[in-house]
Image (tube, grey):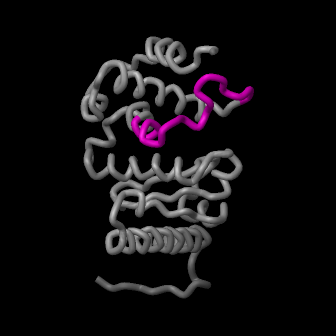
């Protein structure tokens, strides 16, 4: 077998685009692996593995499909990233979002490949529960609240109900087939949103 190495000028436009894409992907993966190696060597808890990314453009390099996400956790790298600019714009704290993302790191390690079979409401609801509250106000969400935040609010409500009312463990939540959002919403609104 003979390898032929072509100069840049000899490549077709398609091959040039693919080479640029390959180098970008390798560069981004190298950055992720650098964060993962640092976390493996120096972190003592899951919270230590959450990195605050100062600028929105830096966050978009790490997570090119980001839209309004406050943070994300790549699978099985043992690290997570939170966007300081997105957090500031949302009016929440870095500590809250870091607690949410740290829980996702733990979920990846504990569930392994089974993680991909667990429904989103369970994973995000447990992470929001670890955070302590949803991004959307529990009792009075603001008008024109984003659908994503309202969904996370519902996930938080369902998980809170399953833990605090039904007494389910985290493992049992991942195994349940029931999404009790109507019952959970009524229970939580009656217990936490009563007018005094």
The furthest residue to the front:
196
Magenta segment, principal secondary structure? loop
Q: Where does the N terminus fall, quadrant-wise?
A: bottom left
The picture places residue 186, in percent across and down from the top left corner, at 50, 12
Q: Is residue 90 left or right of residue 70?
A: right
**57 on left or right of 174:** right
The image shows residue 133, relative to residue 42, as above or below, that is above
Front position in the image: 148 or 156: 156
Residue shown at 47% from the left, 30% from the top: 156
Decide whether residue 4 is among the magenta residues: no
Near-viewer residue (39 or 111): 39
Give the magenta range: 126-144
Which residue shows up at 47% across the image and 42% down it?
A: 131
Q: Residue at x 44, y 12 (%)?
A: 183
Q: Is residue 187 above or below residue 26?
A: above
Where residue 94 appears, x then y in whole percent? Answer: 57, 54
Single out the residue that lies furthest toward the right: 143
Please state which of residues 166 and 83 is positioned toward the viewer in this rendering: 166
Task: Place residue 167 in its image quadrant.
Answer: top left
């Amino acid at each position: 077998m003979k390898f032929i190495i072509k100069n840049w000028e000899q490549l077709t436009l398609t091959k040039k685009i693919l080479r640029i894409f390959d180098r970008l992907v390798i560069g981004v993966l190298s950055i992720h692996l650098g964060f993962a190696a640092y976390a493996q060597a120096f972190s003592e808890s899951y919270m230590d593995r959450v990195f605050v990314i100062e600028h929105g453009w830096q966050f978009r390099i790490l997570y090119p499909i980001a839209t309004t996400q406050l943070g994300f956790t790549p699978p099985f790298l043992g690290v997570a990233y939170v966007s300081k600019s997105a957090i500031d714009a949302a009016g929440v704290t870095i500590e809250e979002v870091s607690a949410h993302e740290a829980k996702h790191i733990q979920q990846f390690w504990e569930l392994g490949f089974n993680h991909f079979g667990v429904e989103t409401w369970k994973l995000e609801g447990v992470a929001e529960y670890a955070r302590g509250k949803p991004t959307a106000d529990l009792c009075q969400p603001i008008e024109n609240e984003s659908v994503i935040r309202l969904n996370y609010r519902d996930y938080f409500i369902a998980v809170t109900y399953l833990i605090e009312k039904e007494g389910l463990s985290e493992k049992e939540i991942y195994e349940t087939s029931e999404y009790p959002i109507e019952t959970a919403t009524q229970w939580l609104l009656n217990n936490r949103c009563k007018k005094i």
